[in-house]
Image: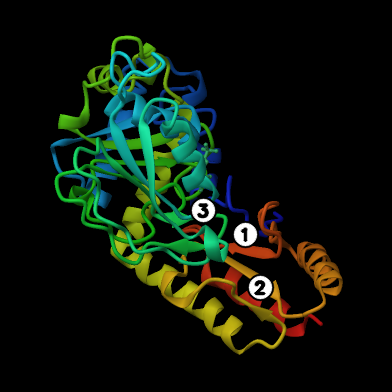
Amino acid sequence: MKRVYNFSPGPSALPLPVLERAAAEMTDTNGTGQSVMEMSHRSKDFKPIIEKTGALLRELMGIPPNYQVLFLQGGASLQFSMIPLNLAAGENALTPGAPRKSVSYIETGIWAKKAAEEAAKYAAVSVRASSKDRAYTYIPQAPAPAPGDAYYHITLNNTIVGTKWAEIPDTGTVPLAADISSCILSEPLEVSKFGVLYAGAQKNLGPAGVTVVIIREDLIGHAPSWVPALLRYDIHAEEASMYNTPPCYGIYIIGLVLEWLRDLGGVAVMAQLNREKADLFYQYLEQSKLFRSPVEKPYRSLMNIPFVCTEADPVRRGDMETRFVKDAAAQGLMNLAGHRLVGGMRASIYNAMPIEGVKALIRFMEQFN
Ligand SMILES: *Cc1c(COP(=O)(O)O)cnc(C)c1O
């Protein structure tokens, strides 16, 4: 069997034991004589799968009972729309000139910016702080919310630029909404500090096609009547993510990933492993003459680590970086190109990346010239 070290930012590597178990259960899951892909989502065979997945996520993240866990479609990007539609939009939000509720956004990268742009279709968006002035290489100070804000939005881990919030901002009574697509379950997170959390599964949780939403119950049920059924948290919550056919197979794989994580010791143990991996790589970058991290130290992500060649001449640097990505791939170190908007390189080292993968990458970098 050939397996590479896959540093892709998403969809990304899954734990090998999860893939092997899914393969073993492909044609006959839990003695049902069916693949999960063939099961009715309303059947007695599928029900325990979605329920177990939800319960395990609650257990591992310590989700309080007054929060709902939803399994939705549309990616993290659809949450850029669903959050303003459900938490801020009024009946007249689409009428030109009608008053709109205010919402606060912190712009820490390209995803944060996209989220704010979607919200501006339904709410009065105020970008309260931005790190664009230094190419998003740091997390700005978070100002207090504006009085009356319907919510306050942050991107907890910025996948493209490789920054993360070191501290969760205190937004008082204004619900904090956070995109945790690329850091869910990477470290312990105090869910009660947030009103809504959301994550596309394909980074750290499972396959593409499922989005997990964790939402405090009092924030459900405020969407105006014109919001389509499939974009309403109240309908998804009432129907326990089964208003229509959920992404059944993806939910099943998330369940296997969560079991793998639980058996490893849970999120605290995972966080320890993630810190070891990230420390090793950052320490290597610190002493390297050839490579460096463009991200300011206090804000460096554990999950996505961009790096660039130190070569000053931009043309030679570009050539080196292209050669780096190509030669690394030839050694089975895959998907190390930086995001197309920022260039350079990026190693995404999510939960499923073993420390051996990071060591192999460092060995490759040590002999690269
Ligand atoms: C990948 C990513 C997104 C976009 O996710 P989709 O599921 O493709 O919509 C949004 N936010 C963050 C932080 C991401 O890493």
| Residue at x-position 52% and y-position 55% | 159
Disc 3 from disc 2: Cα separation: 26 Å
Q: Residue under circle 1?
A: 7
Label 3 near ligand 1 (CB < 8 Å): yes
Q: What's the residue type where badge 1 is placed?
A: Phe
Q: Are marks 3 and 2 in contact (CB under 8 Å)?
A: no
Label 3: state its secondary structure: loop
In percent of width and height, residue 120 lies at 43, 32
Q: Is residue 113 above or below residue 307?
A: above
Q: Residue under circle 2?
A: 361
Label 2: state its secondary structure: helix
Quadrant of residue 176 within the rendered picture: top left
Q: Are marks 2 and 1 in contact (CB under 8 Å)?
A: yes
Q: Pick the residue in front: 104 or 315.
A: 104
Q: What's the residue type where badge 3 is placed?
A: Gly
Tell me if I can see residue 101 in this picture: yes
| Residue at x-position 64% and y-position 71% | 307
In percent of width and height, residue 237 lies at 25, 23
Q: Nearer the viewer, mark 3 or mark 2?
A: 3
| Residue at x-position 38% and y-position 37% | 125
Disc 2 from disc 1: Cα separation: 10 Å
**Residue farthest to the top, as pictured:** 226
Q: What's the residue type where badge 2 is placed?
A: Leu
Neighbour tally class for label 3: few under 14, some 14-19, many 20 plus, Cα within 10 Å: many
In percent of width and height, residue 112 lies at 47, 47
Q: Is residue 54 above or below residue 41?
A: below
Q: Is residue 153 above or below residue 52?
A: below
Looking at the image, residue 299 sits to the left or right of residue 225; the answer is right
Q: Residue under circle 3?
A: 109
Quadrant of residue 242 within the rendered picture: top left
Disc 1 from disc 3: Cα separation: 20 Å
